[in-house]
Image: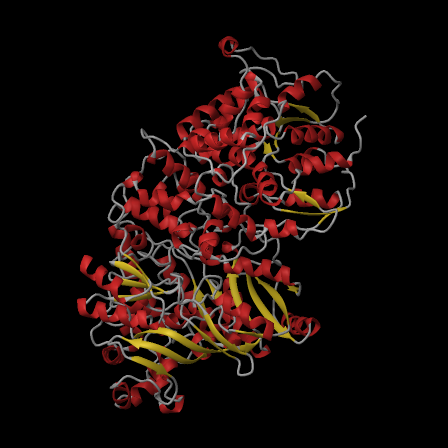
Amino acid sequence: MSELEAELRKAVRGEVGFDVTSRALTTMDASNYRRVPLGVVAPHDADDVAAVLEVCRDHMVPVVARGGGTSIAGQATGTGIVLDFTRHMNGLVSLDPDTRTAVVQPGLVLDRLQEAAAPHGLRFGPDPSTHSRCTLGGMIGNNSCGSHSVAWGTTADSVRELDVVSGRGERLRLGQDWAGAPQGLREAVDGELARLRTGFPELPRRISGYALDALLPENGADVARSFCGSEGTLGIVTEAVVRLVEAPRARALAVLGYGDEGAAAEAAAGLLPYGPLTVEGMAADLVPSTELLPRGGAWLFVETGGETEAEARARAEAIVRAADVVGSTVVTDPGGQRALWRIREDASGTATRMPDGSEAWPGWEDCAVPPLRLGAYLRDFRALLTAHGLRGTPYGHFGDGCIHVRIDFDLLTEPGVAAFRRFSEELAEVVVAHGGSLSGEHGDGQARAELLPKMYGHDMVRLFERAKGVWDPDDLLNPGMLVRPAPLDANLRFSVLPRGPVDVAFGYPADGGDFSAAVRRCVGVAKCRTTSAAGPAVMCPSFRATGEEEHSTRGRARLLHEMLAGELVTDGWRSTEVRDALDLCLACKGCRSDCPVEVDMATYKAEFLHHHYEGRRRPAAHHSMGRLPQWLRLVARTRTAPLVNALAAVPPFAWAAKRLGGIAPERDIPRLAARTFSRWWERREKAPVGTGGDLVLLWPDTFTEHLSPSVGQAAVRVLEAAGLRVALPPTVPWRTPSGGGEGVTVAMDPVSLLRGRERVCCGLTYVSTGQLDRARAVLRRTLDLMEPVLGTAAPVVVLEPSCAAALRSDLPELLHDDPRARRLADRVLTFAEALERHAPDWTPPRVERPVVGQTHCHQHAVLGDAPDRRLREAAGLAGELSGGCCGLAGNFGFEKGHYEVSVACAEEQVLPAVRGAGEGAVVLADGFSCRTQLEQLAGVRGRHLAEVLAEGLGASG
């Protein structure tokens, strides 16, 4: 391997990676399969591609081309050299609106092409649900389709010419009339014209096998079209000329409700004469919430276009009138349409979990039959599932007869894998009996290529082998795919994972306590690789900042998978590769909500750090910021906040403190409050307290207590103005809440008299730095303090979103053996939730000002912000808050080495939004980290919603 690596480094200008991380990141795509490559090359240009092929041919090492790595049949994995086109060969070379063509490189992400074409009223027709990260090269390799194929066809329909390097290093320009055909291809075809004219099923989504029928004279002898869908087995695309289509000026989306998926499938073909842009289907099993959908148990998403909104709507309404539905809705608002489409696009991830939480897998993801046969095929498909004791929920491109489904195969045991093979063989026969194609979108890969003789017969498959031999006589390019295939039950990615339980700290309740199952959640659809955060989305800020796969949620999950496998990453929890990949994880928790399968990388990171540093020296930042509550309580007890602030303002002292604490030198140390929130409360407690309203406990989190007591003071004022009685949690175990309340009479713990007063703590800083033993101790002490509260009906109001999220999610998952943890988590409310639930008749002051700012990423991911939106609206605070992450993320942005990424995250959404705010706009930022980032990077003071409402109440009486 060292000789191969040396020759590649000498031959190419692009990066060559034979290190563990580079290889681990490319062992899998979005399929069930796993292969370990020798190395990864990111070529700069076509010369690099040719050079890689020459070196690999000399060493007889296979080559696999890879785009976004979202293939579902295993064709983007290999044991030799993986070519990664996303790093350099990812450009839009040119776009000609007059000829409606674009010249693209293979690593260009589809959405970037769409963005460039949109100002000209154009677009690329095919649009897979992975459009935000799939590449044009991958789409050509798989002949991808997407939801608009009923209007604009497949990728092959949109390809004009291709620049290709063949297996023997020939540089060919493929087109019509045999343009670019390698020597021997025409002769092979001319001798098989009858077979090519009769051997391919007639249907819109026939992707399986090689498209040799495109070489027939009546089809223009189109070598470029024939190359599409060859899955990197014939040549490597280095550039493509693609056709663009005119985009409708306006669109409408009709969502048609049916009783079940069978009824929806039967209806789909009948809608095609109305010229829809899409006819997509899905059933209720895949929909987390039907709030936006009309009545029904299954739905068709039918999009129409027009020159005006009225024209598009009229076409949609005509379809509604023609359809026999149980419910319908027509949406013309672009935001409403995006929200509905998001439900459909997330299905590829959502489908990996059955309603009971059990796992489901691809493998029979995209069979296609003639649209008129779809209903009958689905009935036979369902019957076969039942006969094998399997479950799966079909969805997909009903108008094209193409069905996606994830099935709950047991791919972890030998009997389960054997059953997977039997089912696959029988389903292939059902598909062929209906005149269908084993693949209708994602290609054959390893998942289906073995079964191609059932669809085409052995003679046609032998012709495929001859064509492969003409293009790639050395079988250098992606061997084991399409011809001479690897068995469909070999190289399964689950076979390398440990069979026994992994000793972990968190409970992983959604995964049955199995850390391996948690890591398996990542199926590789790579929504985390989206290069821009759309709307309120957060995931994955570190990937958007660096563009590196290892800093995506998927990349980190892959490394954790390889850590558990122990083949590539051999040092387990001590792995430096995993540690380095997780280092730039902001623990924003965005993946917990934005990932379709709810991968929770923040928790996995905490788990890893816990084991990685067990019995070892931790980074300085873990002591300085991980133990922040301890240090701040010490300062409060000694009343030395003014001294600490004074020293922090002296550059030499600040430099020394930051160096010792592992803090980024670019950061300013936040000022501590001269008087903590609790001290203010104790003085104020003597004032009369309102009676009659519900009792709420206001949580004095570390940040409110020591750094922003004004937030706590404002919250008290607003909550009391709303008629609520406010108390603070106990500071001695077995004692009533501070501030009066429910009249609970309990004994005081005598031992606590020796310890003095204690404070509740959510353990956030310990969790984020992986100090889980300490976090558990802190949280158990907190539960002891909260014991009397848990026996009352009082909710716990938490002002800091990250602390509220920690109590609601981390607490019960970390102390899964303590029933008190769930009881406390269930009563945690945000400030807005408390007002909405416990003071529903209260009317907030009308502030009547525009707002900008950012929804806290933990609030977005764990808590939800609907009550906050309603409260802002009621107060006359107009405007939408941005998504993304502020980039400070607790300790992350303060740690040495993270400053640049932290700033890049902030520059994505929140800083531009704040800089562009009009005069008089309120900058809302409920999180202390967000406010600190705004202050240090933009010189702007962000405010908690409680502060804005308190100010609106007017001067205190």
Q: Quadrant of the N terminus?
A: bottom left
Q: Is residue 808 left or right of residue 434?
A: right
* Tally of marks: 0
* Front residue of this view, candidates 852 and 197: 852
* Front residue of this view, candidates 306 and 66: 66
Res. 837 image quadrant: top right
Res. 718 image quadrant: top right
Residue at 71% x, 19% y: name it. 684
Residue at 78% x, 45% y: name it. 848
Above or below residue 892? Residue 427 is below
Q: Quadrant of the C terminus?
A: top right
Across and down, in percent, residue 198 comes to 34, 85
Q: Is residue 305 at least partly visible in the picture? A: yes
Q: Is residue 287 left or right of residue 922?
A: left
Across and down, in percent, residue 936 comes to 58, 41
Residue at 40% x, 75% y: name it. 239
Q: Is residue 791 at least partly visible in the picture? A: no
Colouring mode (rainbow / by chain / secondary structure / one colour): secondary structure
Q: Is residue 932 left or right of residue 421?
A: right
* Front residue of this view, candidates 514 and 64: 64
* Front residue of this view, candidates 99 and 495: 99
Across and down, in percent, residue 326 comes to 62, 62
Across and down, in percent, residue 445 comes to 32, 66
Above or below residue 443? Residue 576 is above
